[in-house]
Amino acid sequence: MNRRTGTPRTAWTIRTVVALAAIGSLTACQGAYDLPLPGGAAQGGDVYRVTAEFNDVLDLVPQSSVKVNEVTVGQVEKIQLNGWTARVTLRLPRSVKLPDNAVAELHQTSLLGEKYVQLGAPTDAAPVGTLGDGDNIPLSRTGRNPEVEEVLSAMSLLLNGGGVAQLKVIETELNKAMHGNEGQIRDLVGQLDTFVSGLDKQKSEIVRAIDGIDALSARIAARKDDLAKAIETMPQGLKILADQRAQLTAMLSSLSRLGAVGTRVITSSKADTVANLKDIAPILASLNKAGDDLPKSLQLLLTYPFPDEAVNTIKGDYTNLYATADMNLKSMAGNLGGPGGPGGPPSGGPSVPGIPLPGVPSVPSLPGTKPSPSSSSTRSCIGPLCLGEGESSSGSSSSAGDDSWLSLFQTGGAA
């Protein structure tokens, strides 16, 4: 009896121990995700672990795949909550080489497939360094794709609460507005094409104008303090203008009247002005024909009766000239071209006053020498005053028969 009953007792004891061991093992697990699964990538061997922070991991679970270039290389080891951020620990084999600034994104295998973590090099920056054990991928380099639920929710919002229902109204109103105006619309499209073509041809000028505006803006920005001072002082100037408004109005009214008077004067004297201009035309033509003679005559006028050639008679600090003031009335009348003078017209006839020309002196005499009495002396007389080459005191320039009242002075040596 005991033998028969002993065997069942032993089997029951064994079953009890196995059940208790199974219960103990189950109580030690936190969930089904902690149970080891056969197969998978990076199960053992030489591996390293990195973490990635996500704002939202959706329904990502441990043991999910980690892929690089759509190839499974590792697994999600665990997911932890760090404040409002989810920290995902990734297990990768040592053979996977990634840059230190790698990015991590949550992808989905298909429309209703499972989630996985996609690792890769950054697309907006150059790869730097190498990702190693214990490194962390921050929130700035992580992201996720939109969910199907989010897309359908946005579409539902657009269809129900958006403006899709108004598209028919918009289409109807456009048809009403365009009906019968096809020609004008076609012309408008042609003008728009011409306008856009013109803008395209002048794009370099437009760019240059924009650059000029940019330079002007920079210059204005550099002198903003001066502009601020000008704006601050502008109210004072406006106040002065307001106080002097009556005077400014009176000045403008006076200018208006002056303009009316000037217009009337110009209109009235237009014919006389034109006639005067026509009369001046021959004079200007004659002056133009005179050429260089006019300035030469002005030179002689300023130094009359000494021309420029008189400078040649000056040797050092003396000149060999003489001046005689003849007060004889007969000589004066003759020099002026009157009657009774030598070579003058007969008495009773019309007299034309003669214009004496200054004589150009010949080679001057040296100091201490006497000119030959028989040599002719060049003289030039203006009324009672005659000029000529110097002579000795014994050799008078006038003949014995002249009725000279006074010989003012005679010089023949150094002045």
Image (spheres, grey):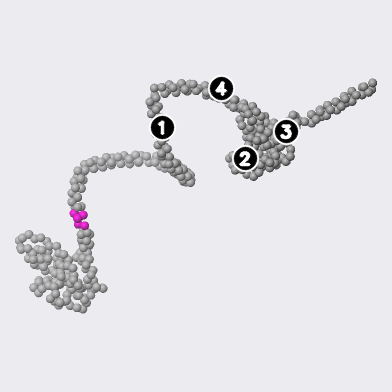
Residue 62's place in the image compared with 5, above or below, is below
Q: Amino acid at mark 4?
A: Asn
The answer for how far apart the CA atoms under marks 1 and 3 are is 67 Å
Q: Which residues are magenta?
A: 286-291
Q: Which residue is mark 4?
A: 160
Q: Secondary structure at mark 1?
A: helix
Q: Earlier in the sequence, mark 1 or mark 4?
A: 4
Amino acid type, callout 1: Leu
Does label 1 or label 2 sit earlier along the sequence? 2
From where the camera sits, is residue 229 visible?
Answer: no
Residue denoted by label 3? 39
Q: Is residue 115 above or below residue 305?
A: above
Residue at image mark 2: 121
Please name which of the two marks, 4 or 2, marks the residue nearer to the observer: 2
Check disc 3 and give the amino acid type.
Gly
Residue situated in front as seen by the camera: 335 or 105: 105
Q: Indicate which disc, 1 or 3, sits on the residue closer to the N terminus.
A: 3
Q: Secondary structure at mark 2?
A: loop
- x 66%, y 29%: residue: 114
**The N terminus is located in which quarter?**
top right
Label 2 amino acid?
A: Ala
Q: Main secondary structure of the magenta part?
A: helix
Looking at the image, residue 274 lies above or below residue 36: below
Which residue reaches farthest right? 1
Query: Mark 3 vs mark 2: which is more N-terminal?
Result: 3
